[in-house]
Image (tube, rainbow, N blue to C red):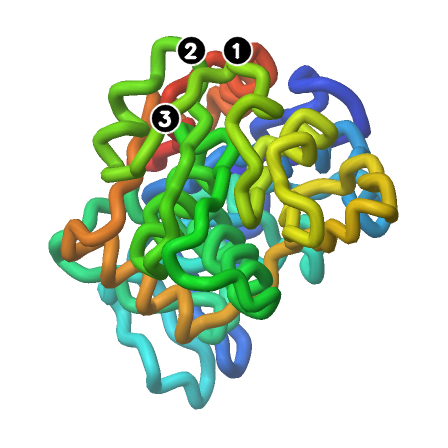
Amino acid sequence: MLGVVAAALGGPEVLQVTELPEPEAGPGQVVVRIRAVCVHPADVAATTGEIPRGPVPPPFSPGWDIAGEVASVGPGTAEFGVGDRVVGMIPWYLTRGNPGGYAEFVAADTDWLVRLPDELDFVSASTVPLNAQTAHQGLSLVSLAMLPTGSSILVTGAGGGVGGFAAQLALQSGYRVVAQASDGDEEWVRGLGVHEVVSRSVDLATVGPVGAVFDAVPVGEAAAAAVEDRGIVVATRPTPAIVPARGVRQELQLIRHDRDLLADLVGQVAAGRLLTRVAVTMPLAEAADAHRRVLAGGLHGKLVLTVP
């Protein structure tokens, strides 16, 4: 099979398309024929070695979120059958690229996968697992902080994958959502139903005070300026400490795969209750160019690699 491997640590040029042995399904596993794999900033960070828990020694395959069809089933595995449509998340923080999703076939534990409803296409489905779970789990930290329903929450990067889901899920939870959008992307973010949209160029200190910030970009100190004293800031990467005297609770949200949660979120996207969007698709063999596109920025939506 064809796969994409990071042969060394570095920029997009380290990604090589190569022939790899086709995987076999072990007990509790299925082999998934990949139809779509979402490209995340985390994939780019993996190739440069800038990831939590330290760099992964190459060679390895990037790729978290996959969608496709079951090609074969391992011994004693009855949950899925050949031909079933599935979507899931390879827990890359555990597999460390063995396997990764940038391949034509992947041997996946059944716990990583959920059924893909017929109403949802492979490309759109591949944008859901990492982004939507991160958003939901980050908002759960806000709920645990006892932020009252109806309070205002600022979501940065609301036009992005995590931020877009966070804004929608915050609305579902009854919060008043102020959403920050990139310049030129305000219309799509407004279409999510948020209460207020602010552009990326706005000083966030003028937006607050809000009870909570979901800093999905993250922008760090700029977002912290919007939160009220004794509020909460949830960020997707480490950000500078806020002055202790303000009593602001800071939380770092890192993904934890939750199969039941994923099934619910995929179902909501399939039913149209949650929106996602794809900016561009590219063939798997163009993974290096895909990383260049992500690094260049300016995409309104996710970039997805596809396999015929």
CB under 8 Å between discs 2 and 1:
yes
Residue kind at label 2, given as amino acid type:
Asp
Q: Nearer the viewer, mark 3 or mark 2?
A: 3
Residue 29 rendering spot, x and y as whole percentages: 48, 74
Which badge, 3 or 2, comes first in the chain's sequence? Answer: 2
Which badge, 2 or 1, comes first in the chain's sequence? Answer: 2
Residue 183's label in the rendered image is: 2
Local packing at callout 3 (Cα closer than 10 Å; few below 14, some 14-19, many 20+) is: many
- Seen from the viewer's position, the closer of residues 167 and 3 is 167
Q: Residue at x 78, y 22 (%)?
A: 10
Question: In the rendered image, which quarter is residue 113 located in?
Answer: bottom left
Which residue in the protein does label 1 denote?
A: 201
In which quadrant will I find the C terminus?
top left
- Identify the secondary structure beneath mark 1: loop
Say if 137 sits above or below 51 in the image.
Answer: below
Residue 197's label in the rendered image is: 3
Q: Residue at x 16, y 50 (%)?
A: 272
Query: Is residue 47 at least partly visible in the picture?
Result: yes
